[in-house]
Image (cartoon, rainbow, N blue to C red):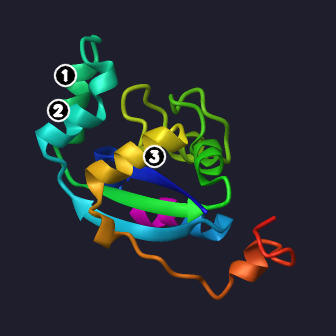
Amino acid sequence: MEKTLIILKPDAVQRGLIGEITSRFEKKGLQIVGMKLMTIPASIAEQHYAPHKGKPFYEGLVRFMTCSPVVVLALAGKDAIVIARKMMGATFGSKAEPGTIRGDYGVSNAYNLIHGSDSPEAATKELGLFFKADELQTWKPTIQEWVYDMTKGTPE
């Protein structure tokens, strides 16, 4: 099963959307294997957003991500990265389709509620920034065989 990092950003936490957003992932069939409420230290935010260093929005983004608590989630599932990103919707809430997280809850082009890893390589790196190995759980939900067709031994 693929793993991905999701961050419910300060605006999602401040607006009381933790349960709503987390519930969407669970109802879709993605498994929570790690979860914590934290205030991101500046050093971690700087590492996480290092690819954007030097861009006009970088300093404001680091400041925003460290200004208030966030919820970091490690999700697992078949094609978890693609599924989670599709559920998140377009980057800007004003352009995101209804039915997506950003489309249903966002209107701002600056505050976009949620971050999700965009590739398996990014997910591995990002999960390592926010979770120690022993903070990620390995468990099999009892409903897994009702989420995936497991008749061939692997999720379909």
Badge 1 density bin: few <14, some 14–19, many ≥20, Cα 10 Å: some
Viewport quadrant of the N terminus: bottom right
Q: Nearer the viewer, residue 73 or 69?
A: 73
Residue bearing the label numbered 3: 123
Please count the marks in the image.
Answer: 3
User: In this image, 26 relative to 55: left or right?
Assistant: right
User: In this image, 38 relative to 27: left or right?
Assistant: left
Q: Residue at x 43, y 51 (%)?
A: 5
Q: Residue at x 28, y 54 (%)?
A: 130
Residue bearing the label numbered 2: 63
Q: Mark 1: which amino acid?
A: Glu
Residue 134 vertical position relative to residue 39 in the rendered view, above or below: below
Q: Main secondary structure of the magenta part?
A: helix
Real-space Cα distance between discs 2 and 3?
A: 22 Å
Locate residue 125, reporting x and y percent.
37, 44
- Mark carried by residue 59: 1
Residue 89 vertical position relative to residue 130 in the rendered view, above or below: above
> The magenta stretch spans which residues?
18-22
Q: Mark 2: which amino acid?
A: Arg
- Kindly indicate whether the residue at mark 1 contacts the one at mark 2 (C-beta within 8 angstroms): yes
Q: Residue at x 43, y 60 (%)?
A: 74
Badge 3 density bin: few <14, some 14–19, many ≥20, Cα 10 Å: many
What secondary structure is found at the residue carrying circle 1? Answer: helix
Q: Residue at x 51, y 81 (%)?
A: 139
